[in-house]
Image: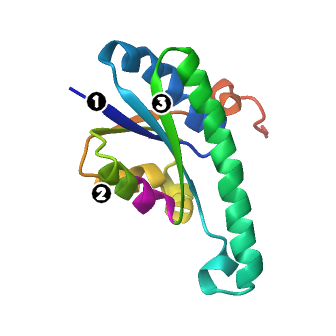
Amino acid sequence: MYQRVVIPLDGSPIAESILPFISKIAGPLDMEVILIRVVPLAPEEVIGIGSTVGLDSAETRKHEAQHYLNTRVEELWTKGLRAQAHVEIGDPAPEIVAFAHKVGADLIAMTTRGRSGLSRLVMGSVAETVLRSAAVPVFLMRMVPAASQAGEGEERA
């Protein structure tokens, strides 16, 4: 059975929507929940322009990401779950897969925005890349913003 689940979060409500589901199954299964947030490098950090500013920026974003995850971990603790948080810097999908391997996870659980067509081609899909490259099972929960579910905010001709 599953003992350790890695949950990637990007700070969005859509990504966090996996937490209530995992909370319901993690307790009875005595699963350890490990939250991860991958802070992507900015383009100037990748090519080395303004390296001092780039490193300060990455460290600042890493610190903010750790604070964000620590808050989510405390919420899980109040529900009686074993949880911890880690922040990595780099390209999200490969970092998530590598991290899951490093900590011995036997499941990755995450949401997907369910993009299709041109938007997925242009934006890419972290969830799809994780699904295709992870050595452990990946549970994907498709989520869409509430406004698009209800048809709100759409212009009509």
Marking on residue 83: 3
User: Is the magenta region chiefly helix, strand or loop?
Assistant: helix
Please tell me whether mark 2 sits on a helix, a strand or a loop: helix
**Residue that appears at 67% across and 40% down:** 68
Residue 6 image position (x, y, % from top left): 40, 40
Image check: 4 left or right of 9? left
Residue 92 image position (x, y, % from top left): 50, 58
**Residue that appears at 53% across and 14% down:** 79
Inspect the image, locate mark 3, and give the three-letter code of the amino acid beneath it: Ala
Inspect the image, locate mark 2, and give the three-letter code of the amino acid beneath it: Ser
Question: Which contiguous range is marked in magenta?
Answer: 91-96
Residue 144 seen from this side: no
> Circle 1: is it few (<14), some (14-19), or many (20+) Cα within 10 Å?
some
Q: Are marks 2 and 1 in contact (CB under 8 Å)?
A: no
Q: Is residue 42 magenta?
A: no
Inspect the image, locate mark 1, and give the three-letter code of the amino acid beneath it: Gln
Residue 39 image position (x, y, % from top left): 60, 58
- Look at the image and tell me in which quarter the C terminus lies: top right
Residue 110 seen from this side: yes
Residue assigned mark 1: 3
Among the two numbered marks 2 and 3 on one chain, the one whose residue lies closer to the N terminus: 3
Among the two numbered marks 2 and 1 on one chain, the one whose residue lies closer to the N terminus: 1
